[in-house]
Amino acid sequence: MKKYLFLLIAATLFSLPAHSDSFYVMGSYFNPDGDSDVFDQNIMETTFQVDDLNGWGGTFGYNHFIGEHFDLGADLAYYHQDTSVEDRGFEFPDGRSIFRDIHFKIVPVEANFNVRPIGRNYAIIPYIGAGIGIYFWEYEERGDFVVDRNTNPNVITGSAFSDGTDLGWNVHGGLEIPFSRSATINTEIKYSKAEGDLDVRGFDPAFGPIDLSMVTYSAGVSFWF
């Protein structure tokens, strides 16, 4: 009996993966959806385009493997983009252009569940997954603004700022390509969905929520241990 018990324990141990966790670092390119009243207004009044929000950042994460086909993990990403826009319809009396600056920052902290359909012992390892997260964000406009545009246009200098912490979700998929026994090259595409309320003290109270949703393209390295 002891012999069979020993063989069972040995078989179990030797069947476990050589690695049970991984840490990854990736450079990321963020494409916000920009589907919000505040962005629509900027498109109408200024040279702003949603693509102006596109920008680089980074993603750092940790995964715990559950057998060959599943893992649980968490990641932290950072996105920050600044752009300057010019008013389309008005200028100062001396002919100078009217500019304002737009600042947008999102820091997602997400928990994810991944499925690796063919396991982790291949030259190319695909995976798909989903997760939920907390999205810390800031949005600011600062500079010169034209008020009462349709009745008595006037230029004022000031700023409007809002921030928040809101819940959201994501779906993602990617590939890992091992280049050693304990390291892989990673590529990933992620779509995240979230929104937050703008502070009505700084922005038009008629504005709907600000869209925090985005597509993120990432590439980097993962270290298994």
Image: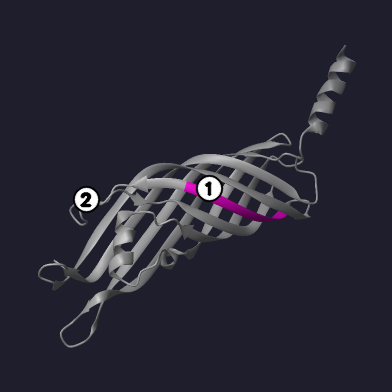
Stretch of the chain drawn in magenta: 184-192
Classify mark 1: residues with Cα within 10 Å, few (<14), some (14-19) or many (20+): some
- To which quarter of the image does residue 11 belong? top right
Colour scheme shown: one colour
- Judging depth in this view, the residue of 73 and 38 nearest the camera is 38
Whole-number angstrom distance, CA of label 1 to CA of label 2 = 35 Å
Q: Amino acid at mark 1?
A: Asp
Residue that label 1 marks: 75
Q: Residue furthest left?
A: 152
- Which amino acid, by three-letter code, is at mark 2? Ala
- Residue 98 image point, x, y percent: 24, 78
Quadrant (top left/top right/bottom left/bottom right) for the N terminus: top right
Membership of 185 in magenta stretch: yes
Identity of the residue drawn at 88% across and 16% down: 4
Q: Is residue 169 left or right of residue 202?
A: right
Looking at this view, is 154 or 197 the one in front? 154
Where's residue 125, x and y in %?
Answer: 74, 48
Tell me: 220 left or right of 133: right
Which callout, 1 or 2, points at the residue further toward the start of the chain?
A: 1
Tag of residue 206? 2
Q: Residue at x 17, y 53 (%)?
A: 201
